Amino acid sequence: MSIPKVLAAVGLALAASCASASVTYTFTADGVTDSNAQQGTAVFVFSDDGSQLALTLTDNVNPTSFIASELDGFTFSLSQAPTTQSLLSVSAQSVINCTGISGSTCPAGDGSSPYGYGSVLNGDEITLGAGFTGSGFAYHPYAIVNASYNSPGGQGGFSNHQHNPLLVGPVTFTFALTGLTSAPDVTDVSFLFGTNPDSQAGTCTTVGGCGDVCTNGDCTSQATACPSRRRWHCSVPACSGSAGACDASCAGPDAGVESTSRKKAASGPPFSFKARKPTLRWAFLL
């Protein structure tokens, strides 16, 4: 393959990489209510334009044994209020039914996406929950439990038929968002556990933060990684909303973007001349 074709292929690959960029935030909760552990992890992955969100929730209580430790709801706020939001799908590791079971092994349960989950948008806040009624939440069945679980029996444990089936996490919720122009920041995260949900505040664990911590000024000193500045046009990096998320685009001259060096050459004469001062030379004949 010729060098121009190789450069063109690299340019297209870089352009595709820039177009498919995403922004990721991680939050965790670690609380206790009435001696019941309530722990979870939430991973947000936004598309760069903010139109898609994949939210993965994990119940970190190991083993999960009681209803009060089941993760069945979640709330969060965005720095930009979407015009609309819609829950597209729910994907779990497995579905189990522990009705009347005492032990660490439950048979497979029935159900399909979205497993009764729903979401509500109120301004910049989105609430997600099990047992969606159209306007509110019952928070069961299909609560999220850890892959390591142990049903102790009794009404407070997994064997309660009203709370079965259950989803074994991690569970990924996919949303479509409209009205956004970039990936938003995330704040005010709360994990909800139990029938009358106990709320545990989420703490951002993403290096650099999950909120309003990046400005374009943070990005101006970062050089764009282009193969060659003499033949490639590199834009000034711009902040996409999170710490260190300074996005920039690179494109080669073969990808339809004129290089900086070519623009400069086109704007002036092809050659420049430097005038010299005349000098006098004397010849002496002896």
Image: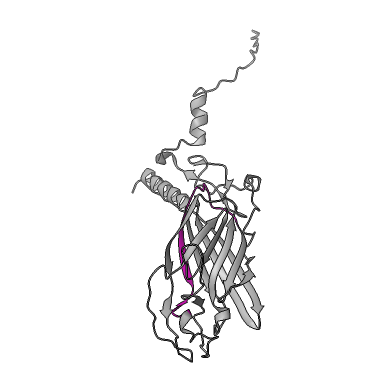
Q: Is 183 contained in the magenta span?
A: yes
In the rendered view, how is the structure colored?
A: one colour
Q: Residue furthest left?
A: 1
The quadrant where residue 5 appears: top left
The quarter of the picture where the C terminus appears is: top right
Residue 118 horizontal/vertical position (percent): 47, 64
Q: Is residue 286 left or right of residue 163?
A: right
Report if residue 206 is visible in the image. Answer: no
Question: Closer to the camera, 134 or 58?
Answer: 134
Question: Closer to the camera, 168 or 245?
Answer: 168
Residue 78 horizontal/vertical position (percent): 58, 55
Q: For the point 44% across and 73% down, which residue is it? A: 92
Residue 119 horizontal/vertical position (percent): 49, 62
Q: Residue furthest top?
A: 285
Q: For the point 42% across and 71% down, which residue is it? A: 115
Q: Is residue 38 left or right of residue 253?
A: right
Q: Is residue 194 above or below residue 254?
A: below
Q: Is residue 242 above or below residue 217?
A: below
Q: How many marks?
A: 0
Q: For the point 38% across and 48% down, which residue is it? A: 9
Q: Is 134 contained in the magenta span?
A: no
Q: Is residue 104 left or right of residue 214?
A: left
Report if residue 36 is visible in the image. Answer: yes
Q: Which residues are magenta?
A: 163-186
Q: Is residue 167 above or below residue 117?
A: below
Q: Is residue 286 left or right of residue 91?
A: right
Q: Is residue 216 above or below residue 166?
A: above
Residue 215 horizontal/vertical position (percent): 64, 47
Question: Closer to the camera, 229 or 121?
Answer: 121
